[in-house]
């Protein structure tokens, strides 16, 4: 696979149209790009005015076996009446290939933005997450990874050390802050946490609303603790987050028991995401889409702020975790 393919420079509109035509789909209008940095995702309408989304997977990120597990999980959820965007089958295959790219076609699921501060909507989401996890616990992924410190902390730390994007005069302080953050997380990461198949990236942007929640984008599905699919839905100050989490859990436990000890993982998981996300951008810097969309990565002030953010998160990790009402 060439670097140009890895960075989608060889994914031309004609390539997309040919790939879809080979599956019997004739694009009538669209090929509107949707927000995705990791993959290339387009919405379109066919000649029968049916709306679809096509996703071209970034080469070399996931193996075909790992993508197949994502698709199988999506199909399993859809079969159990979970409102999820599951890939369509063509000749009994969901993962398709064309000109060196793998791709999948999904039904277009229109909806408005999920309102994270709307407790009624949050209750709906909590109920469906309980159902998703009820299904997710039936078995574990065998090909996709499990959330843990190596992938989310130690490997990113090595990326930071080797990166030329971090200004030399600021690099030592930034690496010290990274090390302090890792040191603060490690004692809080349990070795015996119950793992299950997760959405993995359940932030508000991956939930649409149309008479109820619609879940999209299982690209980051993996094994992990249940709270991973809950904590990114929390916002505001500590009291607001407590109310939101209680709302989610009350609905969630209609279908799935939640271990309250996992609440102590919220801030460690937040710290891990901070580190992992930044390393992800650095890893993708050779993709022309990234320098244009993340220009602040070249600025010294950004690295000063990032160092401060890591140091502040260390303080948060040393504070008592979020406390719920006694019923939990």
Image (cartoon, rainbow, N blue to C red):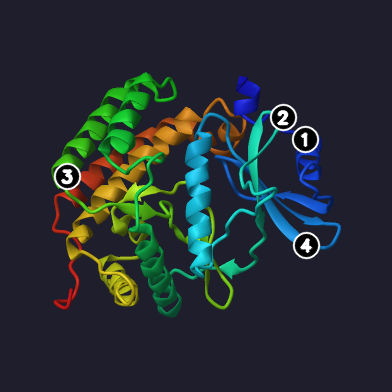
Q: Is residue 57 above or below residue 131?
A: above
Instruction: State the residue position of label 3.
Output: 191
Q: Quadrant of residue 95?
A: top right
In front: mark 2 or mark 1?
2
Other-residue count near label 3 (Cα within 10 Å), few / some / many at <14 / 14–19 / ≥20:
few
Residue 140 in sight here: yes
- Say which residue appears at 37% left-offset and 38% top-offset: 276
Label 4 to label 2: alpha-carbon separation: 25 Å
Other-residue count near label 1 (Cα within 10 Å), few / some / many at <14 / 14–19 / ≥20:
some
Q: Is residue 127 above or below residue 157?
A: below
Q: Quadrant of residue 292?
A: top right
Label 1 to label 3: alpha-carbon separation: 46 Å
Whichever of labels 2 and 1 marks the residue nearer the N terminus, that label is 1
Taking depth in this image into account, of 209 and 47 the one nearest to the observer is 47
- Whether residue 255 sits left or right of residue 62 in the image: it is left
Q: Quadrant of the N terminus?
A: top right
Whichever of labels 4 and 3 marks the residue nearer the N terminus, that label is 4
Name the disc covering residue 71, or none: none
Residue 109 coordinates in the image, percent (x, y): 64, 64
Instruction: State the residue position of label 4.
Output: 50
Instruction: State the residue position of label 2.
Output: 99
- Say which residue appears at 36% left-offset and 62% top-offset: 133
Whichever of labels 4 and 2 marks the residue nearer the N terminus, that label is 4
Name the disc covering residue 15, or none: 1
Q: Secondary structure at mark 2?
A: loop
Q: Secondary structure at mark 3?
A: loop
Q: Is residue 132 above or below residue 318?
A: below
Residue 301 in sight here: no
């Amino acid at each position: 696979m060439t670097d140009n393919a890895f960075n989608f420079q060889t994914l031309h509109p004609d390539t997309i149209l040919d790939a879809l035509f080979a599956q019997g789909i004739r694009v009538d209008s669209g090929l509107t790009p949707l927000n995705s940095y990791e993959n290339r995702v387009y919405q379109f309408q066919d000649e029968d005015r049916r709306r679809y989304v096509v996703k071209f997977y970034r080469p070399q990120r996931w193996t075909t076996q790992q993508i197949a597990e994502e698709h199988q999980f999506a199909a399993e959820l859809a079969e159990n009446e979970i409102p999820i965007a599951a890939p369509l089958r063509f000749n009994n295959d969901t993962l398709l290939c064309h000109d060196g790219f793998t791709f999948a076609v999904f039904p277009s699921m229109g909806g408005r933005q999920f309102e994270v501060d709307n407790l009624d909507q949050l209750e709906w989401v909590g109920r469906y997450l309980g159902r998703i996890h009820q299904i997710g616990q039936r078995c574990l992924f065998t090909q996709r990874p499990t959330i843990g410190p190596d992938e989310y902390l130690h490997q990113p730390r090595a990326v930071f050390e080797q990166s030329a994007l971090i200004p030399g005069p600021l690099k030592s302080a930034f690496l010290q802050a990274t090390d302090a953050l890792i040191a603060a997380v490690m004692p809080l990461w349990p070795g015996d946490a119950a793992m299950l198949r997760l959405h993995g990236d359940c932030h508000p942007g991956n939930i649409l609303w149309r008479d109820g929640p619609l879940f999209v984008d299982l690209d980051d599905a993996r094994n992990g603790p249940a709270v991973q699919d809950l904590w990114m839905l929390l916002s505001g100050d500590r009291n607001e987050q407590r109310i939101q989490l209680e709302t989610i859990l009350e609905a969630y436990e209609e279908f799935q028991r939640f271990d309250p000890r996992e609440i102590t993982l919220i801030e460690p998981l937040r710290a891990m995401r901070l580190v992992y996300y930044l390393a992800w951008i650095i890893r993708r810097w050779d993709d022309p889409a990234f320098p244009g969309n993340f220009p602040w990565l070249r600025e010294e002030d950004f690295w000063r702020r990032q160092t401060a953010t890591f140091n502040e998160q260390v303080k948060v990790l040393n504070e008592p975790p979020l406390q719920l009402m006694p019923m939990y």
